[in-house]
């Protein structure tokens, strides 16, 4: 746990250590969890033991990380031993050797030793230095957030959050990642101005382009250019000259101001400006706010959210939106706008996909689409700050005290209102979450062949009085199809280009759902509740298994995923540590989506 009355830097280091260690324990075979009573065993006896990110329920555990290059081990106390891979740790760390007393070390020295360990990084010094730079950048970003006021106590603890308040709740980034808040290319001032956790609004920068130098696509009758013009017309604060430019036959492009400044330096964009084919109309209009993903932005007045390309790397990916991703979103929107979407809405009324029906991008003088200029239009059901909702990652993020969370604040509020115990409320909340969020995603995959990459940032939970009442799924560009369903999907949606989407065999789709929906999302809820002392993990996992068994008993078309979750001894999990260490860009360098995954013990099968 994190101690009280420590500086923001010390808290940032401890928060960073938790995310770093949880990712390392999942992937490095030279780790193990052991009872503290076993400390009499020499460190050398633990080397080479695969490290599941799980442990038994008893108190008094520690993690050991082997560093054979130094003939030593790093030991750290485990404050919360987790079956689902969300451990909490008790710093400091200690280096153990056979010949000397335990030596306390700080987190950054630990990260340096890990990066230099040949058994982990194969002695690649260049990658190690890039990796360490990102680790330090992430720590600095977390420290900067901690040194500023957090969300108001009333949010979560006294009332349900607005959509954007739910987005701001994620302050520390990915819970299982060695650099959870790294932002290559962003300065500290960039983060303060454009990152969701700071809560600052900014005006869009508007460009006007000759229509022949614009690439666009749309799922409906209204072209993307029309949606952009309507977006401008609907902003009462927008400068008249911007609206007028859209009436002169030019295409209005709503640009993220940071990206617009970057792009202005690019030769291909400069050539368009010099040729008079592109005009900068300046920054204007009502404020927009970053969501947790940073490149998706929201304005309370607007009919659409915008998802934009940003020329920077966050955690594992360069955030440039490629043309095929845009087309995938358009085709998914067509699919869900037809008869299949109507049937889903009727059967699963609490499930809504935030469609991405249109996109715009500039072309170069030679006619090539420029992905760095992409703007995608995303549905905005949260206009005028309603209805209440919170992104799952924000609900599950552990506070700087090492125990609290936004979800915990909601549960304490509900317990006080109902005169019930927090434990009883937590169990009911989790059961409601399973029905509202988890069951629909599994049914959609099992009966309709649609795979949604439902990780924590893509799940927005609609709330009513603190209780889950709706699932909003976002990121259509990551949606896939189960190949065994293609004939039926082609029959149901004859005008949809199914080849534009990800195609996965049923078994592969099951493994991906096992990571995104289970290991990343549901297990995070379980870990948060257990860390906060609201419930024990085995009980929650047993309730999850009961849901899966109930679904398995239904006449669903393809139970491959449900059977996998119930019976597979292991679940696949994305290897964020090594993906980050190897400097892989997931957006362009990964062909096989499971290539960087590792196997974790499946707590559901053991329940």
Image (cartoon, rainbow, N blue to C red):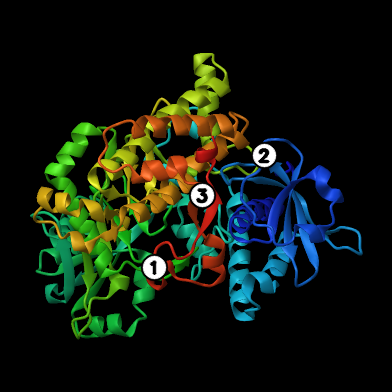
Q: Earlier in the sequence, mark 2 or mark 3?
A: 2
Residue 529 versus residue 72 in the image, above or below = above
Q: In the rendered view of the protein, which quadrant contains the N terminus?
A: top right
Q: CA distance from mark 1 to mark 3?
A: 26 Å
Which residue bears the numbered disc 3?
570
Nearer to the camera, 141 or 174: 174
Q: Quadrant of residue 552?
A: top left
Residue at the spot of label 1: 587
Q: Where residue 481 sits in the image (x, y, percent)? A: 26, 54
Q: Quadrant of residue 557?
A: top left
Q: Secondary structure at mark 2?
A: loop
Question: Disc 1 versus disc 2: distance between alpha carbons?
Answer: 37 Å
Q: Residue at x 41, y 52 (%)?
A: 511
Q: How many marks?
A: 3
Residue placed furthest toward the top = 419
Q: Quadrant of the C terminus?
A: top right
- Camera-near label (1 vs 3) is 3
Q: Which mark is on residue 254? A: none
> Of label 1 and label 2, which has the lower sequence position?
2
Using residue 183 as the reference point, say whether residue 480 is left or right of it.
Answer: left
**Which label belongs to residue 56?**
2
* Secondary element at image label 1: helix
Q: Could you tell me which secondary element the residue under label 3 belongs to?
A: strand
The answer to whether residue 472 shows anywhere in this view is yes
Residues at marks 2 and 3, CA–CA distance in whole angstroms: 17 Å
Label 1 vs label 2, nearer the camera:
2
* Residue at position x 57%, y 45% in the image: 149
Please tell me which residue lies in front, 38 or 577: 38
The residue carrying pointer 2 sits among few (fewer than 14), some (14 to 19) or many (20 or more) residues within 10 Å by Cα, namely: few
Residue at figure coordinates x 57%, y 61% from the top left? 179
Whether residue 231 is visible here, answered yes or no, is no
């Amino acid at each position: 746990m994190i101690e009280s009355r420590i500086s923001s830097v010390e808290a940032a280091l401890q928060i960073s250590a938790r995310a770093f260690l949880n990712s390392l324990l999942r992937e490095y075979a030279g780790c193990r969890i052991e009872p503290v009573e076993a400390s009499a065993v020499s460190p050398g006896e633990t080397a080479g033991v695969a490290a599941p990110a799980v442990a038994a329920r008893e108190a008094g555990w520690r993690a050991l990380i082997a560093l054979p290059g130094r003939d030593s081990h790093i030991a750290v106390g485990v404050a919360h031993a987790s079956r689902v891979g969300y451990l909490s740790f008790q710093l400091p760390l200690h280096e153990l050797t056979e010949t000397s007393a335990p030596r306390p070390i700080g987190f950054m020295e630990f990260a340096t030793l890990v990066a230099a360990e040949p058994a982990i990084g194969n002695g690649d010094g260049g990658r190690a230095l890039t990796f360490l730079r990102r680790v330090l950048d992430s720590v600095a970003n977390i420290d900067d957030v901690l040194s500023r006021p957090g969300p108001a106590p009333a949010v979560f603890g006294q009332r349900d959050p607005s959509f954007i308040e739910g987005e701001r709740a994620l302050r520390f980034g990915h819970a299982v990642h060695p650099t959870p808040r790294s932002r290559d290319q962003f300065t500290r001032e960039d983060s303060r101005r454009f990152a969701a956790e700071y809560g600052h609004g900014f005006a869009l920068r508007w460009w006007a382009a000759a229509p022949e130098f614009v690439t666009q696509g749309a799922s409906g009758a209204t072209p993307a250019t029309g949606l952009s013009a309507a977006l401008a017309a609907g902003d009462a604060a927008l400068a008249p000259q911007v609206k007028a430019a859209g009436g002169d036959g030019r295409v209005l492009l709503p640009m993220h101001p940071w990206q617009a400044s970057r792009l202005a330096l690019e030769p291909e964009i400069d050539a368009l400006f010099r040729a008079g084919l592109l005009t900068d109309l300046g920054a204007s209009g009502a404020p927009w706010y970053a969501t947790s993903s940073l490149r998706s932005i929201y304005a309370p007045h607007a009919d659409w959210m915008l998802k934009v390309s940003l020329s920077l790397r966050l955690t594992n990916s360069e955030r440039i939106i490629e043309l095929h991703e845009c087309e995938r979103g358009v085709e998914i929107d067509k699919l869900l706008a037809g008869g299949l979407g109507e049937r889903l809405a009727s059967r699963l009324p609490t499930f809504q996909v935030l469609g991405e029906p249109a996109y715009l991008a500039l072309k170069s003088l030679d006619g090539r689409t420029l992905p760095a200029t992409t703007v995608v239009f995303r549905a905005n059901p949260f206009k005028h700050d309603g209805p209440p909702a919170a992104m799952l990652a924000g609900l599950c993020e552990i506070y700087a005290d090492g125990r609290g969370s936004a979800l915990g604040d909601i549960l304490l509020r509900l317990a006080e209102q109902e005169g019930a115990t927090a434990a009883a409320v937590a169990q009911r909340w989790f059961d409601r979450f399973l029905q509202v969020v988890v069951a629909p995603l599994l049914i959609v995959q099992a009966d309709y062949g649609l795979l949604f990459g439902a990780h924590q940032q893509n799940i927005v939970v609609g709330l009513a009085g603190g209780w889950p009442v709706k699932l909003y799924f976002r990121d259509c560009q990551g949606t896939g199809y189960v190949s065994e369903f293609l004939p039926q999907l082609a029959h149901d949606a004859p005008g949809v280009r199914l080849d534009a989407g990800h195609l996965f065999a049923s078994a592969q789709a099951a493994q991906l759902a096992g990571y995104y929906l289970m290991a990343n999302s549901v297990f995070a809820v379980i870990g948060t509740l257990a860390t906060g002392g609201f419930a024990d993990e085995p009980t929650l996992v047993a309730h999850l298994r009961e849901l899966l068994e109930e679904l398995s008993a239904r006449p669903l078309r393809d139970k491959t995923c449900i059977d996998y979750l119930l019976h597979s001894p292991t679940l696949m999990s994305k290897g964020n540590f090594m993906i980050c260490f190897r400097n892989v860009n997931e957006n362009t360098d990964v062909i096989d989506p499971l290539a960087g995954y590792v196997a974790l013990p499946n707590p559901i099968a053991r329940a």
